[in-house]
Amino acid sequence: MEMCSSHLVSSGINRLISDEQQYDRHRLADEHSLYLQQLTDEQHHVYDRIMQSVNDGVGGVYFLYGYGGTGKTFVWKTLASGLRSRGQIVLTVASSGIAALLLPGGRTAHSRFAIPLNVDEFSTCNIKQGSALAELIIKTKLIIWDEAPMVNKHCIEALDRTMRDLLRFKNVHSEEQPFGGKTIVFGGDFRQILPVIPKGSRQDIVNATINSSYIWNSCNMLKLTRNMRLQADDANVHSSELKDFAEWILSIGDGKCGESKDGIDTIQIPNDILIKEWEDPIAAICRAIYPEMFWPSNSVYEVEDRAILAPTLQIVDEINRYMMSLNPCESQTYYSSDKACPTEPSNELIASIHTPEFLNTIRCSGIPNHELTVKVGTPIMLLRNIDHSAGLCNGTRLVITKLGKHIIEAKSMTGKNAGQKVFIPRMTLSPSDHRIPFKFQRRQFPIMVSYAMTINKSQGQSLSKVGLILKKPVFTHGQLYVAISRVTNKKGLKILLCHEEERSNETDNVVFKEVFRNV
Ligand SMILES: Nc1ncnc2c1ncn2[C@@H]1O[C@H](COP(=O)(O)OP(=O)(O)OP(=O)(O)O)[C@@H](O)[C@H]1O
């Protein structure tokens, strides 16, 4: 949506620019020198390259490649504090709301750059020349875009096209320079789930990633290889055990574990992670991850920092229903009101098909179901950005504390706002799913129950206990890697396999190795 310039520019002051210059420069200068002393040699090299590019003002495109825990966020924080302490503007964005929360002053790329929801090779951002947002971009010294491999390359190309155009009055060569001659640094891990292309083939998915874009030819690669999370971790855990676990996770991400056949690897799950004793697989995985829920006299239902993951929504729903049945509190069901958006030209026949009753039956990811049953104590996940500064964005997990008629009260589970109570209102939501060939609106609380969630939805979450249930093997690139890398502690991970007739410790791992061809 185009930002209203008059609203953001009042009495000659561009609010978007002044917001970005409001940082406490003394505090940031102290923070910056502290971070700078701590940087490892490889982190320092990355920092120097990017700072050099900003200071020279010549622009440049960089990609910082490093798996989880190598300190990408640490480098982003050092860069941002260094430039902001000088009063310079750094825009920090991420492809998902959860990753954006980890960045200082972070926003999602879509909201920051007004990127359209449905993009193609001709798309541009909704930013007008002369608008407040255009001025902000012109004044920006550095753009940091985390988790870039999970977004469709057309989103990144839309920003490139827009910036080449916006900067042409400032830089006569902007149209020939990537991102109009600004410095931009992308980050991320190609082992994770790649852009989701509904009904897309393997080739379509690989083709939609940033390293299949024309932008990639201008990208300077920078790498981080040392796992800083493991170094910082609990000294009680034997470090060689942690190292082995981290290497096992990486070998799954790289597709270098197990035997390969027709592009699918068969891997073995270690005995201490596998759940072998079970009658009912759903009950068994729930008992492993939420044992307190099975204690008869228990009144404290610990759900924080835990989740059960599965590849498909169907199993996720089954687990959530099962877990809800263990909570003795009274349930409340909220029904959405759905309506079709008018079509042009208005068509009586279509209107008679898209009745509210028909719309109520539609279930798709990204919007809540028509019928939403919850209880006090139910863990939920937000499906929309509500208030980024309060840590309430798409993907934030909370626990319900009170159920009203028009509002739900909940408590944040993680992050700097953990424990804080918030109110969630009903919102009008429209699905952006290409598979629904017409537009409709649903008014409902923007939440889903999250005892269990799909692996795709868990990307970016950091959890102390993870249960992975595979009634069917994983089916796309990165799913197994993302599922098992949500925990850093081996003890927190349990896997239950029930996709074979006979009990086995083997399952599939899908890695599109061609995606690593040029990284
Ligand atoms: N040079 C450093 N000195 C001290 N601690 C560091 C350093 N670099 C990273 N860390 C710490 O290591 C942990 C992992 O770093 P960070 O979160 O930046 O990694 P990441 O690559 O962004 O991981 P992810 O992709 O999983 O978010 C953090 O606790 C961070 O504070």
Image (cartoon, grey):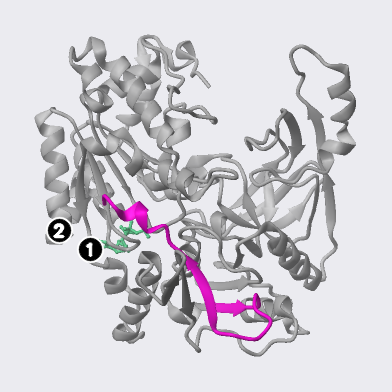
- Structural crowding at the residue carrying mark 2, measured as other residues with C-alpha within 10 Å and reported as few (<14), some (14–19) or many (≥20): some
Q: Is residue 136 visible?
A: no
Residue 518, magenta (yes or no): yes
Q: Left or right? Give the position of 237 relative to 465.
A: left
Q: Amino acid at mark 2?
A: Glu
Q: Position of residue 362 (x, y in %)?
A: 78, 42
Q: Which residue is mark 1?
A: 225
Give the CA distance from mark 1 to mark 2.
Answer: 8 Å
* Kind of residue at disc 1: Thr
Judge from the rendering whether residue 40 lies leftward or rightward of residue 234; answer left or right.
left
Q: Which is nearer the eye, 208 or 271?
A: 208
Residue nearest the observer in this picture, 161 or 107: 161
Tell me: residue 440, above or below residue 105.
above
Instruction: Magenta stretch: give its range.
Output: 494-519
Circle 2 residue: 42
Please, is residue 443 above or below residue 256 in the view?
Answer: above
Q: Residue at x 40, y 43 (%)?
A: 209
Residue at 46 percent of width and 60 percent of height: 478
Count of numbered labels shown in the rendering: 2
